[in-house]
Amino acid sequence: MAVQGSQRRLLGSLNSTPTAIPQLGLAANQTGARCLEVSISDGLFLSLGLVSLVENALVVATIAKNRNLHSPMYCFICCLALSDLLVSGSNVLETAVILLLEAGALVARAAVLQQLDNVIDVITCSSMLSSLCFLGAIAVDRYISIFYALRYHSIVTLPRARRAVAAIWVASVVFSTLFIAYYDHVAVLLCLVVFFLAMLVLMAVLYVHMLARACQHAQGIARLHKRQRPVHQGFGLKGAVTLTILLGIFFLCWGPFFLHLTLIVLCPEHPTCGCIFKNFNLFLTLIICNAIIDPLIYAFHSQELRRTLKEVLTCSW
């Protein structure tokens, strides 16, 4: 994605420059001020990307194999894994092509690189948008399953889930194409930031409401057993910790990237903002880390999915 030249692009690799030594240290910005810059080595970035690629591919294959997992909830989880797979795959592909160009092992015309770069940018942006959307869809699905338990199967049907999935993919591709075409417009960056904040608020409100309902349910059960305070407090603490971890990981992994976009709008020439811009590759790495963590949170907690995963790993098709 083209963002103020902060991300390395394929065309820039035609003028090969030495790769920076991976380190955590002080770097000088354009004004000569000293600032903290975290350099991510290409090897580490590629390794994390490949881990995410394999992990999410296994989730997709596992859900596709087991018909018992062909439900709306697992449909959203599968699409989240596919989105994370595309995020990782597109970044791994771009980094690999850049390294090959810099090493002189790959020669291509500028026009070809421009087209390839645009395609990779669209894939990366659309998969990021769809990943955020499916995180929101999973939260909505869980909310309905708790607050409308008796009507859940009539509200969240597989055909409706498939239509929602199709709408998310189409919207993600269309909007990402527009974002890439008009990336230098402030309105585009603001739309992306507002979208992220909307997903964050949606997830926070739904999960906090679900936690409150779960605590009420636990309190009611505790009253029946005359153990109200210990059970309620223990359950509430455990739920609060789980909620904090879930939302904290989401904010930690995605927040810096959208902070970067926000600062491009607010202070593109400020020295302090310039220091933050230098860490763009770190922000991308955090998104790749989120793609690694997502299956652990949303997929691998399922006992049936883990059982099917073992069959996939042992090639028991």
Image (cartoon, grey):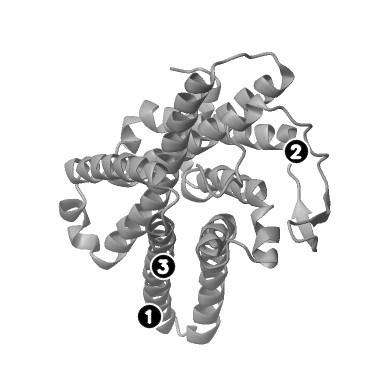
Secondary structure state at the residue bearing disc 3: helix
Q: Label 3: which residue?
A: 207
Secondary structure state at the residue bearing disc 2: loop
In the rendered view, tell whether residue 89 sits above or below residue 253.
Answer: above
Looking at the rendered image, the disc whose residue lies closer to the viewer, 1 or 3, is 3
Among the 4 quarters of the image, the one containing residue 210: bottom left
Front-lying residue, 30 or 125: 30
**CA–CA distance between discs 1 and 2?**
53 Å
Q: Which residue is depicted at the point 41% across and 54% down?
A: 185
Question: Circles 2 and 3: CB distance less than 8 Å?
Answer: no
**CA–CA distance between discs 2 and 3?**
36 Å
Q: Label 1: which residue?
A: 220
Q: Earlier in the sequence, mark 2 or mark 3?
A: 2
Expressed as whole percent of the image width and height from the top left, the position of residue 26 reads 84, 57
Residue type pointed to by label 3: Tyr
State which quarter of the image contains the C terminus.
top left
Residue type pointed to by label 2: Ser
Q: Earlier in the sequence, mark 1 or mark 2?
A: 2
Q: Earlier in the sequence, mark 1 or mark 3?
A: 3
Expressed as whole percent of the image width and height from the top left, the position of residue 86 reads 47, 34
Q: Answer left or right for 291 relative to 39.
A: left
Q: Label 2: which residue?
A: 41
Residue 77: mark in rendering: none
Looking at the rendered image, the disc whose residue lies closer to the viewer, 1 or 2, is 2
Q: Which residue is depicted at the point 76% across and 54% down?
A: 37
Residue sticking out furthest to the front: 31
Among the 4 quarters of the image, the one containing residue 25: bottom right
Expressed as whole percent of the image width and height from the top left, the position of residue 144 reads 27, 61
Tell me, yes or no, if residue 304 can be seen here: no
In the rendered view, tell whether residue 80 sits above or below residue 202.
Answer: above
Expressed as whole percent of the image width and height from the top left, the position of residue 184 reads 45, 50
